Image (cartoon, rainbow, N blue to C red):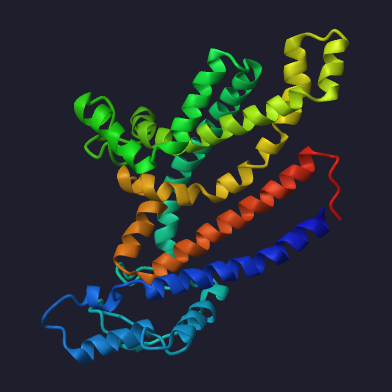
Amino acid sequence: MFKYLQRRVIQAIPTFFGVTILSYLVILTAPGDPVAMITFSPRADKATIDLMRRQLGLDQPPILQYVYWLVGNDWTTIDTDGDGVGETPGQRRGLLRGDFGNSIKQKRPVMDLIAQRVPATLRLGVAALIIGFLMGVVLGVLAAVFHRTWVDQVIRIISVIGNAVPQFWLGLLLIIIFGVQLDILPISGMQNITRRGGFDLGDALRHMVLPVFVLSLNWIAFLSRFTRTQMLEVLQQDYVRTAYAKGLQTKVVWLRHALKNGLLPVATFLGPAIGTVLAGAVIIEQVFQWPGMGKLIIDAVFSRDYPLVMGSVVIASIMFIVGVLLSDVMYVVLDPRIRLE
């Protein structure tokens, strides 16, 4: 097992750097200039703009910008008085030495900004994953057990609709219905900002209802169809027919024999699902104004905040790689027939 983990980690290293290179190229080729957005003033002269570009390292060739972002440099200037002009020579250690740099727009360390937003995204994403997996598996098992009945047909229709409906459209529709017309659920934020006192669990749950439902719907739709297919395949196996021939009750055959083996491939999706939490939350957090990583990334992209965008990409890449690794390990643990050396 240790050798397998070691090999998988080594294989993930070029994947990680490949993701950062592609992301960096996309950012560099995107229209817009972060310096122009910061110095959006008719009084900004060319000398100030050139100095700021030199301060941010944007006057270097793209390949050197990427290298400096990875390993750091010793010529970076630090803005000591917040006026956007570099004054004091300093040092940036680079990503490989734990320094994600400073946000161009907010002038704060990228890791501090990300650390503030990660808990909100995890709250939303973990809740959506739990609901998505539980409801998806339950609906899939029911569809397989009641194969070719009205229950199966209804669940299949729900899964098709869940896969077809765009998340942003569904989110806006739910906001109009439950937040505007019926006025029974909050439509933005994590809590009521006008409420006095400490943390209110009921208020927090009410704010989570709509974004969690929209974010989990795709998982419900996908897992219900996948679980149904796996269960139907397992129910046709010889050992299931043997269990029936022994006189076991139908409930025992489903729960003890068929369900355990049918859910084995489903369990392996948990790892990649953890890695895609951030990607799925980008749209949902923007629609519902949820103050998490997704909204932070959107704001950074629109403001051309390169260090913040790249820092978010690094965190998302690490989450996905760890999720895939967890999925591989989970499959080995759950299925003793597999032997990886």
Looking at the picture, tell me which residue is in the foreground, 182 or 228. Answer: 228
| x and y, in percent, of residue 79 in the image | 31, 81
Q: Where is 132 relative to 280, above or below?
A: above
Looking at the picture, tell me which residue is in the foreground, 194 or 100. Answer: 100
Quadrant of res 290: top left
Q: Residue at x 50, y 19 (%)?
A: 154
Query: In the image, 146: left or right of 109?
Result: right
Outermost residue toward the bottom? 47
| x and y, in percent, of residue 164 in the image | 43, 37
Q: Residue at x 77, y 20 (%)?
A: 256
| x and y, in percent, of residue 34 in the image | 29, 74
| x and y, in percent, of residue 63 in the image | 49, 84
Query: In the image, 265: left or right of 85?
Result: right
Residue 292 in sight in this render: no
Residue 4 in sight in this render: yes
Query: In the image, 82: left or right of 135?
Result: left
Quadrant of res 227: top right
Outermost residue toward the front? 148
Q: Residue at x 43, y 59 (%)?
A: 114
Q: Quadrant of the C terminus?
A: bottom right
